Amino acid sequence: MAVSLTVNGVERKLDVEGDTPLLWVVRDELGLKGTKFGCGAGLCGACTVHLNGQPVRSCSTPVELAAGAQITTIEGLGDQDRLHALQEAWIEQGVPQCGYCQSGQIMSAAHLLASNPSPSRDDIVSAMTGNICRCGTYSRIIAAVESVAADSRPDQQEGA
């Protein structure tokens, strides 16, 4: 099946089976290895990407459902010259231990902040609930999201 996707702003035309999970298209066909396979059932969140701005579990999303869509992976959040604010906060807060789940965590956090730039702690916990961290760095994840949210508030910016 011919599928056209826009991944991280680049249009891609692929010939893949329609029921192929988007995860394998992103990783194997496009070589974007930041999105991870965790459970294969859409339960852990390691494979989270944005599909038309919404977080989805790419391990359980058939590529045919993504045809014509805008897809953003962890590689599309920042660029080689400048990390996304969440990626910087992850480093500053020392969030990753093994790091395996972190791309999915960051993608979920990015969606939260895009839809709610000033989330409460409860909002953050609720938005991140579907992402499992086997290393248990949840308090650091919350702190990283809180720091980016605080930096984006006008009363917290320099000169305000």
Image (cartoon, grey):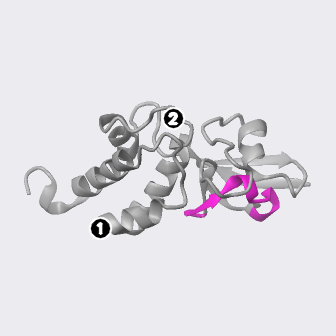
Task: Residue at 61% x, 53% y: name it.
Answer: 44
Q: Nearer the viewer, residue 51 or 129?
A: 129
Q: CA distance from mark 1 to mark 2?
A: 25 Å
Residue 56 - label: none
60 is within the stretch colored magenta: yes
User: Mark 2 belongs to which amino acid?
Assistant: Gly
93 is within the stretch colored magenta: no
Task: Residue at 73% x, 56% y: name it.
Answer: 41
Residue 129 position within the rendered picture, expressed as x and y whole percent measured from the top left: 49, 61
The residue beneath circle 1 is: 120
Looking at the image, the residue that sits furthest to the left is 159
Q: Is residue 98 left or right of residue 45?
A: left
Label 2's element?
loop
Q: Residues within 10 Å of mark 2 (few under 14, many from 20)?
A: few
The residue beneath circle 2 is: 99
Residue 95 position within the rendered picture, expressed as x and y whole percent measured from the top left: 39, 39
| Quarter that holds the N terminus | bottom right
Range of magenta residues: 52-65
